[in-house]
Amino acid sequence: MIDVFTAANCIAGGRRTSGKPAPLRWRIESIDGREVRTASGQRIDVDGPISTRSPADAVVVPGPFVPDVEGFLNRKELVTPLIEALRRQHQRGVLLASYCTGSFLLAEAGLLDGSVATTHWARGKTFAQRYPNVDLRINDIITEQDDIICSGAVTSALNLALRIVQKLVGAEVAAETGKLMLIDGNRVAQSSYASMSENHHSDALVLRAQRWMERSLQRGFSLGELARQLAVSERTLNRRFKRAMGKTPLHYLQSLRIDVAKRLLETKDLTMDAVSQRVGYGDLSTFRRLFKRETGLSPRDYQRRFSRRHRHRVAVAA
């Protein structure tokens, strides 16, 4: 993000009169003012301890890169000073921003209750269960409400940085910065990158239902038929499925079909009609409409962007 801010200052510098200071200045702060070691082992020097006494127009919360985010949040010696500082800054009217799992800290502070938010797509289920009062928009790259901006997985920090430049310096400087740094400002959804393999649970009934769905993907089925196969009522199946997966069986089936379609588009040389048929959509226009609604891209655009066959051919030609 600091690279983005530095580039924005350079661009703004070409428009400033001589002697006028750069529009963006920043500090890196930690709880105790000591250097921070990242998840990859790098050491980052800091400018001092977190302090609400130092003036700021915006505060950015990086996402803690931890396998167990809820376990991290239970470490009160780390989390309590952070959320107290965030609450004080919010009371002062400071713009708060986070990317990836940083939104968990904003939610833990109670600052997202009744507001929209996003986080890493693989953490959406955990976030929704822990913070039911937050309007989670897990497909969105960026959300903004009440001077709080959240963004998705870690590279969306670049989009977040551009949004901060836009708000603090101006839209023209932000647009030129994005072009200079090749930041895709048109990314609007995380869903094209999401994978259903991140859905983990231990409900044996739901696992049986999922396996049956996978075998019956092409022909489809009704909820009643699935319930009969599993020897349970439709009500029980719905309840257990929503608790384990965060969605109804029929919604899961639709997501499963789109997920399989994504893999086919990435790895197989198939026509759009063939892909549509393989995942159970007899009508190609319906498949295209649902695919774009779920991923934010048309099937053809998705194939162009993510096809592994295409990337391999380019590598050989090079």
Image: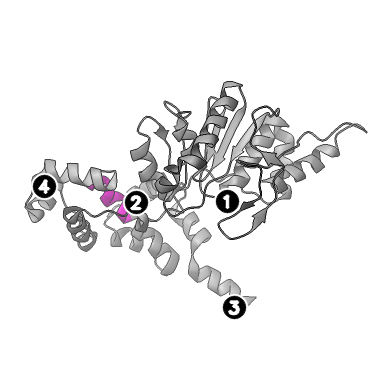
The earlier-in-sequence mark between 2 and 3 is 2
Q: Is residue 304 magenta?
A: no
Q: Which residue is mark 1?
A: 155
Evaluate if marks 4 and 1 touch, with contact meaning CB atoms under 8 Å apart.
Answer: no
Q: Which residue is mark 4?
A: 224
The earlier-in-sequence mark between 4 and 2 is 4
Q: CA separation, marks 4 and 2?
A: 24 Å
| Up-down relation of residue 154 to residue 136 (above or below) | below
Q: Nearer the viewer, mark 2 or mark 1?
A: 1
Q: CA separation, marks 2 and 1?
A: 29 Å
The three-letter amino acid code for the residue at tag 3 is: Val
| Up-down relation of residue 92 to residue 295 (above or below) | above
Q: CA separation, marks 4 and 1?
A: 42 Å
Q: Which residue is mark 3?
A: 316
205 displayed left or right of 269? left
Residue 31 rendering spot, x and y as whole percentages? 60, 40
| Region of the chain picked out in magenta, as a range | 248-257
Q: Nearer the viewer, mark 1 or mark 3?
A: 1
The earlier-in-sequence mark between 4 and 3 is 4
Q: Nearer the viewer, mark 4 or mark 1?
A: 1
